[in-house]
Amino acid sequence: MGDESGVRDDWSLPDDLVTELEELELHELREVVHYAQDRIRELQAPVSDKIEAAPGEELHSTEERPEYTEVIKSEPCGEGCPDCPHGPYLYHVYEEVKPDGNASLHWVFLGRVFGRDGRHE
Ligand SMILES: [Zn+2]
């Protein structure tokens, strides 16, 4: 890794496919990467399967959308607070697949949710 002196020749891909990939233009290769990332997303378990409430959190809902997973949860702020957990808060969660194939969840905080989903006062 990190040295560009040689071409890696131990891909576990069919030779025909490697040959075809090597003939592609840069912009086509970028398309292939995007295509592969989409396919990985399709084949992997849904993001909502990977979301669990952390200690002190209360998970209200997770919903798969085409571009992201919508998560509504309440969260604790710290020790000794009588009002915990706070919220509920809305997040959009994206699964990001890195070029090395590892995926991680990217949480985008969108704000407090009013008047929906299971906040029992
Ligand atoms: Zn609190």
Image: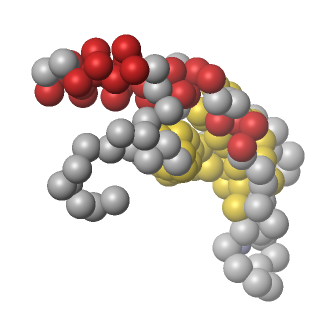
Image color mode: secondary structure
- Quarter of image, ligand 1: bottom right
Residue at the (58%, 21%) spot, across then down:
42
The quarter of the picture where residue 7 lies is top left
| Residue extending furthest toward the right | 120
> In the figure, is residue 70 to the left or right of 52?
left
Q: Judge by depth and name the residue closer to the eye, 48 or 120.
A: 48
Residue plotted at (14% across, 27% down): 26
Left or right side of 2 for 56: right
Q: Position of residue 114 (x, y in %)?
A: 63, 41
Q: Is residue 40 above or below residue 49?
A: above
- Say which residue appears at 23% left-offset and 24% top-offset: 22
What quarter of the picture does the N terminus occupy?
Answer: bottom left
Q: Which is more toward the observer, 84 or 94?
A: 94
Q: Quadrant of residue 30?
A: top left
In the displayed orientation, state which residue is furthest to the bottom.
80
Q: Is residue 111 above or below residue 97?
A: below
Residue 1, visible in the rendered structure: yes
Q: Give left or right: position of 60 versus 93.
A: right
Q: Is residue 120 left or right of residue 47?
A: right
The residue positioned 62% from the left and 23% from the top of the image is: 43
Image location of residue 52, percent across then percent down = 77, 50
**Residue 54, x across and y down, in percent:** 76, 61
Provide residue 72's location: percent of width, then percent of height: 67, 42
Total number of numbered discs in the rendering: 0
Residue 67 visible at all: no
Q: Nearer the viewer, residue 43 or 94?
A: 43
